[in-house]
Image: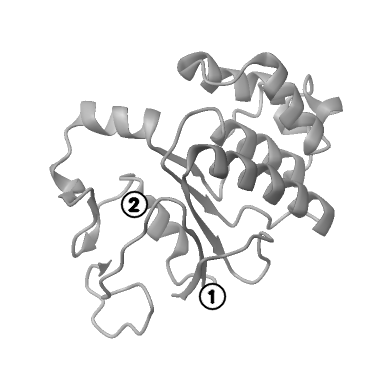
Amino acid sequence: MVFKEQTQVVSDVWRQELSFQKGECCLVEAASGTGKSSLCSYIYGWRDDYEGTICFDERDIRSLRTNEWVHLRNASLSILFQDLRLFPELTAWDNVELKNKLTHYKTRRQLEHCFECLGIADKRRVPVGKISLGQQQRVAFIRALCQPFDFILLDEPVSHLDEANATAMAALLQEEAAAQGAGVLVTSIGKQLPMNYTKTLHL
């Protein structure tokens, strides 16, 4: 897999044959602009402007129908986009609840626990547009946990977090991934989510 119209690429990922298994924790390190966000969008099926093949359970994702993508994203594949994609006029709680009402995956107490663990319990009723980027990042992360998943993709999840909050996020993610036996893929341009990575790849 590689960007279309790019032939001279040296990378651990582009133009390589790779497999990613449940239970693995993979870090993808990259310089800014080398394609980490694109990689996540390709895997998630958000974009298809690449050459090569991406398979889930040996099936080319280009062959998936709309209803199959819906099921996959509801039950097997979660993502934290770099640009977060929150609704600024809604409160932090409502942004999370919007997804959880679709999945019915977390109880109210479980969601409250996530807000408490990440130090934003006092921001639950504040519109997202009025809280800091670091706080928004934590809200989007909680939203990504509001579903079952076999794999979770996190694109620069700690770019606006200090060490203490990054550690709290890592602990919550490791707990959730372990409970589901899920694979974790994290991208970074230098500041890393502190996890025990199974492997590190360079774009």
Residue located 54% across and 75% down the image: 31
| Quarter residue 71 falls in | top left
Whether residue 78 can be seen here: yes
Mark 1 vs mark 2: which is more N-terminal?
1
Depth check: 189 or 26 in front? 26
Depth check: 68 or 45 in front? 68
Q: Is residue 44 left or right of residue 123?
A: left
Cβ–Cβ under 8 Å for marks 1 and 2 = no
Q: Is residue 19 left or right of residue 40?
A: left
- Picture coordinates of residue 41 (x, y %)? 38, 51
Amino acid on which the number 2 mark rests in the picture: Ile
Label 2 residue SS: helix
The vertical placement of 78 against 186, above or below, is: above
Label 1 Cα crowd, 10 Å radius (few <14 / some 14-19 / many 20+): few
The residue furthest right is 122
Q: Which mark is residue 31?
A: 1
Q: Which scheme is used to colour this image of the protein?
A: one colour
- Picture coordinates of residue 140 (x, y %)? 62, 37
| Quarter residue 110 falls in | top right
- Picture coordinates of residue 17 (x, y %)? 25, 71
Residue located 23% across and 68% down the image: 4
Label 1 residue SS: loop
The residue furthest left is 63
The vertical placement of 3 against 120, above or below, is: below
Q: Which mark is residue 43?
A: 2
